[in-house]
Image (cartoon, grey):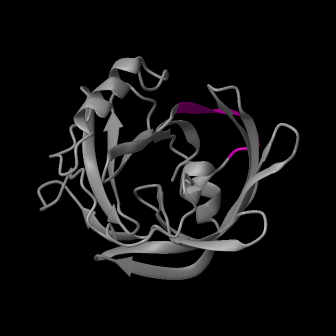
Amino acid sequence: MTKGKGITAALVALLLSAAAPVGAGSFKAPEGCETWLTVQSRGCRVSNHYRCSADQPGDQWRADFDLEGIFFLSRIDAEAQWVESYEFNPRVKQVLDGADDPASFSDLLQGRDDFDFRLSRDNGEKTHVTGHDALTGQRIAIDGIELLQTEFDFTEVDAEGNQLRRARGREYVHPEWRLFFAGPSEWHDGSDWLPSDGSPVQFILPGEKGFAATQPIFECGAMMSEAPGTLLPQQVRHDR
């Protein structure tokens, strides 16, 4: 990869070829990158987090897998601000397209962060996201890892101002890892609020059983509460 340029087509192809079959083996980060955390979550999702030496300091990648393989890949910066992401079914690239009030992890750790930014997809779609994250003051332990609980509310509109998505709820952050993790939330489908919960269940570090897994293990036999084709809130606004 070229410093600051993000993922290459070859890297996308590598991830696609390595992640397709159910029961696939370990995730292998691209050359020059190192996987450092695997998270098994509710909603039949496993995520592998990795860092690449060619990226800007503080940048992090996350590859999300379901039973059919990889479905979402994203990069954030040192402030946990969404830089770029890739959906694979159908394949769409999305990038940050400017911000009047950039997302700031540092501001959030002081209590609250308001954000106002724009996104651009390679299919021509442009959207505008506004909202906030705020600490609730609660500390939550999941699998022995202490996290700070947040509450959020965000709205995404198209170029004409039509509402595309709105969500609200709780998430979790790890101050030292500078990462967000999903929590119990609600989506508005235009008429009703629909529940969603992609909370982490297991945090797996190098050397531990299940590290770099590409097969999710939690709630894979249950009916998913998310609307079909709907990404988790942190995959819509600033990665997380």
Q: In which quarter of the image is residue 60?
A: top left
Question: Which of the two residues, 97 or 223, is positioned nearer the viewer here?
Answer: 223
Determine the residue positioned at 51% across, 40% down.
77
Residue 229, x across and y down, in percent: 54, 51
Q: Is residue 62 visible?
A: no
Determine the residue positioned at 41% across, 17% down.
2
Question: Which of the two residues, 60 or 175, is positioned nearer the viewer here?
Answer: 60
- Prevailing SS of the magenta stretch: strand
Lateral position of residue 66 relative to residue 188, left or right: left
Lateral position of residue 212 relative to residue 129, left or right: left
Question: Which of the two residues, 95 or 121, is positioned nearer the viewer here?
Answer: 121
Question: Which of the two residues, 143 or 13, is positioned nearer the viewer here?
Answer: 13
Residue 56, x across and y down, in percent: 46, 30
Determine the residue positioned at 32% across, 70% down.
221
Q: Where 27 sits versus 98, above or below?
A: below
Q: Is residue 140 visible?
A: yes
- In the rendered picture of this protein, how many numbered marks are placed on residues? 0
Q: What residue occupies the far right of the structure in this picture?
A: 160
- Within the magenta stretch, is there residue 231? no
Magenta region: which residues? 92-102
Q: In which quarter of the image is residue 72?
A: top left
Residue 80, x across and y down, in percent: 54, 48
Q: In which quarter of the image is residue 121?
A: top right
Quarter occupied by the N terminus:
top left
- Within the magenta stretch, is there residue 94? yes
Lateral position of residue 51 relative to residue 229, left or right: left
Determine the residue positioned at 27% across, 39% down.
20
Residue 164, x across and y down, in percent: 75, 51
